[in-house]
Structures are given as structure tokens and as C-alpha cells.
Image: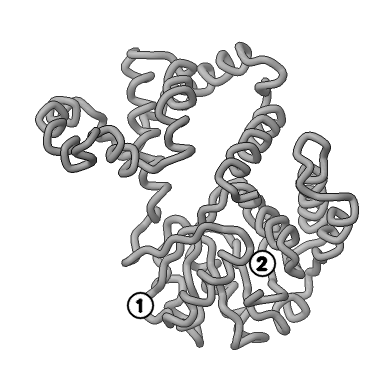
């Protein structure tokens, strides 16, 4: 293992997910936050996630392995104790540049050798590292929720990020079961979020224009394209869709038919304010139509999602 001890800085949803993922893969984790209450909640949530992996339905961890995983996570409000002797820091502070700068300054006061992997989706890494003493050690990382099940981590380097930092981070993430991809250049929103936003914008627009219901647009993704996306990406699906001619044939012959579609598609930079209530009412209606097994509230949806992800990951050979 490239790094045997890691600090998870910040104990929100992403921090909890990282702590669970690391513990599952045999890495000792010290989770830092500013007060005991947050850490107590985070530790409870982390243990619930580990219990999930040890449950009869999932059966990924034995009782002994579950106990060992729990023992790998400890918590502290002492930043010096948290960061001084680790080699890798997974920073999960708020999406705020000023706060990111203060976090990095605090870390560098006690550790000038560790890689700082800053979790961000909208701030460029070069800006995060702008005031750092060691910008070569700072890298942008963007995981997906739930971190302990979704393998993807998008990685971006800043103007001064060392290639060694990138290489070690990629290697480490692979060792702990993640699927890292490295951006060739910085980009707000990285890759997957930008595609999600494009899909969500069109989904919202279809409902807003009265073309379909919230439930039907969700079904269109779940039982249509989403099934295939869980197995192959868009380019490989187009390769299959083009028959013997592959993706070149499909792009050449379908392009003329797409022009009127593109012209009719939504160009919002944000959803209309009134869509919040439309979406809420649609989701409540959709939940009412779901069975208890499928999840009728957030907890049920989370369980249904996680159990399904485990089966899909096993098919991919990731669990």
C-alpha cells in the first residue's frame, strides 16, 4: 500500500464515505473535524455503513473483518495529532475558496510532506493551491456519493502540482479499489458532474414543459439508458449502436437527424425557481408509487441504491 495511514479532514457525507472506503481496504484512518459532536455522528454513520457490508444480504465482510475495519477509524479534534504523521490527507472542507485556503494553511503548519487531496467539484485546483507553501503537493479529487460504493474518482492537477503527486495519488486510489481518471486540463465540474447536469437540465425541462411527469422521466433513465450506462459508457454504446461500422458509422449517419433535436433542447443556465415545487411534488408522488422494497423515503431509497450498487459492482468485479 502506497500510504498506510491517512487523515480524512472533514467528517461530512464525503468524509464519512472516504473513511469507510479506506478502512475497508486496510488503511488506518484518523478523521478530523472541529468539534466532538460532528465526529460522534460521523463515527456512528461510518459504523452503520460497515454494518451494511457485514449484513447477511451483502456479506462482504466477516464478523472479524467488520471488527477490524471499525478499529481502523479513530477521530480527533486536534489538528496536529490528525495530520502531523500521515502521508496522505483527504481534505473534504466546504466548497469555499477562503475556507480551503485556511485549511491548507493549518495543515501545512504541521505537515509539509503529505499529499493534500482536495475534494472539490467547482473550484480550480490552481486557485485552491494559490497560497500554499507546497503547491506541488496539492491535487484536486472529486469522488461520487456514496464514496464507499461508487468507484470513480476524478483527478485534476493545478498549475504547480507535481507529476509525482498525480502518479502516487492514482496508484493509491487504485490500491483502495477506486477507479481514478485524470483530467488533461482543469475544468469546473470535472467530467461526470457536467454530464449529469446536462441530463438533469433536459429532465427538468421535459417535466417543466408538460411533456412527461417526474416519475416517467425517472423511469426513462432507470429502465432505459441508465441500465446500459451502468455497464458501458456512451462511446462504447455508440460503438455497438453503429453495427459493423461502429461509432464512425453511427456518428456519420445519425448526425443529420440530430440537428432539430439539438435546436429544441434546453439551454437554461439554471432551472426556473418555480421548478423546485414542481420537482418536490413529483418526487412525493413517485415515492408513493414505490414498494417498500424499492424505498418510499430517503432511508429506503438509500438502502435500495446501495444494495443494487453492490450487485452491479460484483458483476464488474469491483467487490
Residue carrying label 1:
159
Q: Is label 1 in contact with label 2 (beta carbons under 8 Å)?
A: no
Whichever of labels 1 and 2 marks the residue nearer the N terminus, that label is 2
Viewer-side residue, 271 vs 255: 255
Task: Pick out the residue farthest to the front.
Answer: 244
- Rounded to the nearest angstrom, the CA distance separating label 1 from label 2 is 23 Å
Which element is circle 1 on? loop
Instruction: Tell me the tag on residue 9.
Output: 2
Identify which residue is drawn at 40% across, 33% down: 200
- In percent of width and height, residue 311 lies at 63, 37
Q: Is residue 26 above or below residue 166?
A: above
**Snapshot quadrant of residue 186:** bottom left
State the residue at coordinates (75%, 61%). 23
Q: Position of residue 290 (x, y in %)?
A: 63, 15
Question: Residue 32: where, in percent of width, then height?
Answer: 73, 67
Task: Give the SS element for disc 2.
Answer: strand
Identify whether 183 is placed above or below 150: below
Q: How many tags in the picture?
A: 2
Q: Is residue 317 above or below residue 104?
A: above
Front residue of this view, candidates 34 and 261: 261
Q: Please state which of residues 153 and 246 is positioned toward the viewer in this rendering.
A: 246
Dividing the picture into quarters, in which one does residue 7 lie? bottom right
Nearest the viewer among 185 and 175 is 175
Q: Residue at x 41, y 64 (%)?
A: 182
Q: Position of residue 49 (x, y in %)?
A: 76, 46
Amino acid at each position: 500500500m502506497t500510504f498506510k495511514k491517512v487523515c480524512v479532514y472533514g467528517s461530512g457525507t464525503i468524509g464519512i464515505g472516504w473513511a469507510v472506503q479506506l478502512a475497508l481496504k486496510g488503511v488506518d484512518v484518523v478523521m478530523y473535524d472541529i468539534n466532538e459532536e460532528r465526529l460522534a455522528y460521523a463515527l456512528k454513520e461510518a459504523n452503520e455503513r460497515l454494518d451494511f457490508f457485514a449484513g447477511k444480504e451483502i456479506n462482504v465482510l466477516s464478523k472479524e473483518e467488520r471488527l477490524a475495519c471499525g478499529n481502523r477509524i479513530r477521530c480527533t479534534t486536534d489538528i496536529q495529532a490528525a495530520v502531523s504523521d500521515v502521508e496522505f490527507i483527504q481534505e473534504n472542507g466546504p466548497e469555499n475558496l477562503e475556507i480551503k485556503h485556511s485549511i491548507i494553511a493549518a495543515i501545512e503548519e504541521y505537515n509539509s510532506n503529505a499529499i493534500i487531496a482536495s475534494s472539490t467539484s467547482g473550484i480550480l485546483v490552481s486557485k485552491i493551491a494559490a497560497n500554499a507553501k507546497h503547491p506541488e503537493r496539492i491535487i484536486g479529487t472529486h469522488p461520487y456519493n456514496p464514496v464507499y460504493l461508487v468507484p470513480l474518482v476524478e483527478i485534476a492537477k493545478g498549475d504547480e502540482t507535481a507529476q509525482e503527486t498525480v502518479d502516487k495519488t492514482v496508484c493509491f486510489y487504485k490500491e483502495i479499489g477506486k477507479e481514478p481518471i485524470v483530467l488533461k486540463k482543469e475544468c469546473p465540474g470535472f467530467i461526470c458532474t457536467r454530464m449529469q447536469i446536462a441530463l438533469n437540465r433536459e429532465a427538468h425541462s421535459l417535466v417543466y414543459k408538460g411533456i412527461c411527469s417526474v416519475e416517467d422521466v425517472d423511469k426513462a433513465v432507470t429502465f432505459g439508458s441508465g441500465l446500459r450506462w451502468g455497464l458501458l459508457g456512451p462511446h462504447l454504446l455508440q460503438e455497438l449502436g453503429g453495427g459493423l461500422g461502429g461509432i464512425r458509422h453511427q456518428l456519420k449517419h445519425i448526425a443529420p437527424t440530430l440537428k432539430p433535436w439539438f435546436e429544441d433542447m434546453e439551454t437554461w443556465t439554471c432551472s426556473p425557481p418555480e421548478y423546485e415545487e414542481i420537482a418536490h411534488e413529483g418526487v412525493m408522488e413517485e415515492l408513493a408509487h414505490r414498494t417498500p422494497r424499492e424505498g418510499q423515503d430517503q432511508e429506503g431509497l438509500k438502502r435500495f441504491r446501495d444494495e443494487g450498487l453492490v450487485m452491479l459492482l460484483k458483476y464488474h468485479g469491483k467487490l
